[in-house]
Amino acid sequence: MLQVGDVVVSFDVLKEKFLCDLSACRGACCVEGDAGAPLELDEVAQIEEVLPLIWDELSPEAREIIDKQGVAYVDRESDLVTSIVNGKDCVFTCYDGRGCCYCAIERAFRAGKTKFMKPVSCHLYPIRVKDFGTFKGVNYNRWDVCKAAVLLGQKENLPVYKFLREPLIRKFGAEWYAELETAVEELKKQNYL
């Protein structure tokens, strides 16, 4: 473990390789699993603000779920998460003509319609952040649907923390990320990485 400020980072985040390969996985992380994407409380209002911009892109099933329970719910582990369709698909998941899924929120962001990109937990994936009160834990979440991303990351020799530079800065700030990079270089000099 490496501590940077009040954030404890698992060595797996520093050592393991990862590079999303959407052509291989087709966006499976948005449609697999037993709960929606973890949300921060302030993100619910941001999503609700974006909702009118993306409503027509959402499936009829997703719109029905949102009408009944809203954009988020508290799952069985007491975490606030995005609402899901049929026990797995995120309500904001849409499909292109090739069967590849995309996030309607991110698509609106990339089109310049909103300043909210998507939930930070989605942006950070495969990293999961857990708040322990006095510190936050940053861990690498291994999942079979991301096997192609691991292989591509190994081929390109891209560590998880470098692949996720932008979302880590979004979550913890540029100064924190610079401290992380400095600490990683020191660990490499000492042959810990």
Image (cartoon, helix red, strand yellow):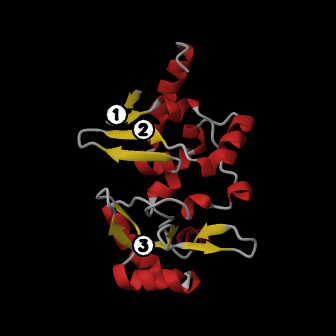
Circle 3: element type: helix
Q: Is residue 165 left or right of residue 66?
A: right
Q: Which residue is label 1 attached to?
A: 5
Amino acid type indicated by mark 2: Trp
Residue at horizontal 45 percent and vertical 55 percent from the top: 121
Q: Which residue is label 2 attached to?
A: 176
CA separation in Å, label 1 and label 3: 29 Å
Residue at horizontal 70 percent and vertical 35 percent from the top: 154
Counting from the top left corner in percent of width and height, residue 151 is at: 71, 40
Amino acid type indicated by mark 1: Gly
**Mark 2 surroundings within 10 Å by alpha-carbon count, few (fewer than 14), some (14 through 19), many (20 or more):** some
Mark 2 or mark 3, which is nearer to you? 3
Q: Is residue 163 left or right of residue 12?
A: right
Amino acid type indicated by mark 3: Ile
Residue 113 image-quadrant placement? bottom right
Chain-order first, disc 1 or disc 3: 1
Residue at horizontal 54 percent and vertical 43 percent from the top: 142
The mark found on residue 47 in the picture is 3
Quadrant of image for the N terminus: top left
**Is any part of residue 135 visible from this angle?**
yes
Q: Is residue 144 above or below residue 10?
A: below
In the depicted view, which residue is nearer to us: 40 or 167?
Answer: 40
Query: Pointer 1 and pointer 2: residues touching (CB < 8 Å)?
Result: yes
The mark found on residue 117 in the picture is none
Counting from the top left corner in percent of width and height, residue 193 is at: 56, 21
Circle 2: element type: helix
